[in-house]
Image: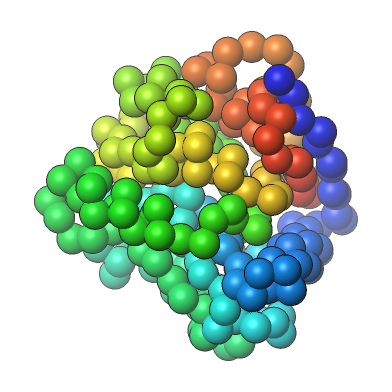
Amino acid sequence: MTTLTQFHTASSAQALAQDLAAFVADRLREGLSSRGQALLIVSGGSTPLPFLDALAQLELAWSQVTVTLADERWLPPGHADSNERLVRAHLLQGPAAKATFVPMYTGEATPMQAHGLLEASMAALPWPADAVVLGMGSDGHTASLFPDAPELPAALDASRLERCLAVAAPPLPNVPVPRISLTRRALLDARALVIHITGPGKWALLQQAQQTGPIEALPIRLAWQQSQVPCHVFYAD
């Protein structure tokens, strides 16, 4: 199965961030208009920071928007490598401070111990998401779905009902701490799926990932090897 992909390019990473913010805001407004609420799922890392900054300044009914993460490193929210910290610092500011944020880190010793609580928390969100914004690592991972990881078959199993999954610490150069990640079921339960990347290296890897091959080798292929949700690629050098 392959879904339709639309490509959006810009002259710079900053211009791309503005374009993506406008695109996502429009998806949220559609959700607000049709059902009185909206759900946004975002990712951590350095690439989305200008996008989050731009989106935070746009006017919409933020008090009716729920925000959560595609994945989280199992670290307290004050830690430098916490995705929650990035979202709070870059998105939940200005007008967007009125949004409801649902964290993934719960304080338990391990993500496995928190799985039941997190599953209930994720299930209670107003699905489908109006937009899921994903990045892509240099190894082809997305969210915390890493190539050939032991958890990957369960995460990609379309018949499984779980929306999140505990993930063991990945190898370097990824931050080597355990994670919690949304599964295929949750990532594709959306009205719009976005891949946000910058730089020629990521572009070359994206081209490779769009070729026929196993998702296990390049988990970003999940975005194309499905027919549930339109995929939008936002790219700049």
Residue at left offset 46%, top offset 56%: 69
Q: Is residue 60 above or below residue 103?
A: below
Q: How many marks?
A: 0
Of 183 and 171, the residue lying toward us: 183
9 relative to 107 in the view: left or right: right
Horizontal and vertical percent for residue 57? Answer: 67, 82
Residue at left offset 45%, top offset 37%: 183
Residue at left offset 68%, top offset 73%: 32
213 relative to 168 in the view: left or right: right
| Residue that extends furthest to the front in the rendered view of this protein | 35
Camera sees residue 188: yes
Residue 4 location, quadrant = top right
Residue 102 location, quadrant = bottom left
Horizontal and vertical percent for residue 54? Answer: 68, 73
54 relative to 166 in the view: left or right: right
Horizontal and vertical percent for residue 212? Answer: 70, 12
Residue 36 location, quadrant = bottom right
Q: Is residue 230 above or below residue 114?
A: above
Q: Is residue 35 above or below residue 56?
A: above
- Quadrant (top left/top right/bottom left/bottom right) for the N terminus: top right
| Residue that extends furthest to the top in the rendered view of this protein | 213
Residue at left offset 29%, top offset 38%: 166
Coloring scheme used:
rainbow
Horizontal and vertical percent for residue 143? Answer: 48, 42
Camera sees residue 146: no
